[in-house]
Image (tube, rainbow, N blue to C red):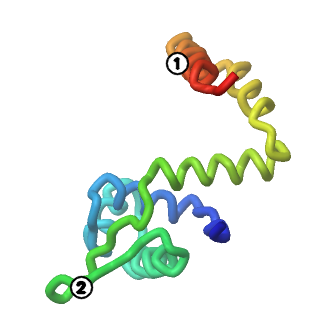
Amino acid sequence: MRPAKPTLTEQELEIMKVIWQRETATVRQVYETLLERRRIAYTTVMTMMNILEQKGYLKKHQEDRAYVYQPSQPQQQVIRSMVREFVNRVFNGSAEPLLVHLVEDQHLTEKDLEEIRRTIKSAASRRPR
């Protein structure tokens, strides 16, 4: 089994979301997208993307004079790993307290709760008996 990758920081996840949406992106493209939301330095984006490459979340190849980055893992796989790490760290590996918190959260709509019910029912029906 491969060792787990270090979890993403908030800023790293923000960059990854841009790249997952675009599928491929240069530092300039990510920088310009983030700049629409908030102030950020180009060099910060470049540094963060290099860190993401070192952590194994991005891979790059050169096109003309710029590097083009792409995700090395699908978004769902990374999110699943982050959720698993969170559950292990906060709830000692048990997902039940997390679900209880989510269900008791006053911000969930009836639609959200119904989706949770459907997901649980679907998962239960797929489990071997």
Q: Quadrant of the C terminus?
A: top right
**Residue 97: image location, x then y, percent:** 80, 31
Mark 2, other Cα within 10 Å: few <14 / some 14–19 / many ≥20: few
Q: Earlier in the sequence, mark 1 or mark 2?
A: 2
Q: Going 59% across and 19% down the picture, which residue do you hit?
A: 125
Residue 100 seen in the current view: yes
Q: Going 64% across and 47% down the picture, which residue do you hit?
A: 83
Which residue in the structure is indicated by mark 2? 62
Up/down of 8 relative to 26, above or below = above
**Residue 41: image location, x then y, percent:** 41, 75
Front residue of 57/11: it is: 57
Q: Secondary structure at mark 2?
A: strand
The three-letter amino acid code for the residue at tag 2 is Gln
Front residue of 61/112: it is: 61
**Residue 57: image location, x then y, percent:** 48, 69
Q: Is 68 positioned to the left or the right of 57 in the image?
A: left
Seen from this angle, which residue lies furthest front?
129
Which residue in the structure is indicated by mark 1? 115
Residue 6 seen in the current view: no
Up/down of 116 relative to 50, above or below = above
Q: Going 67% across and 48% down the picture, which residue do you hit?
A: 84
Q: Is 72 positioned to the left or the right of 121 in the image?
A: left
Instruction: Tell me how far mark 1 sits from mark 2, CA to CA.
Output: 43 Å
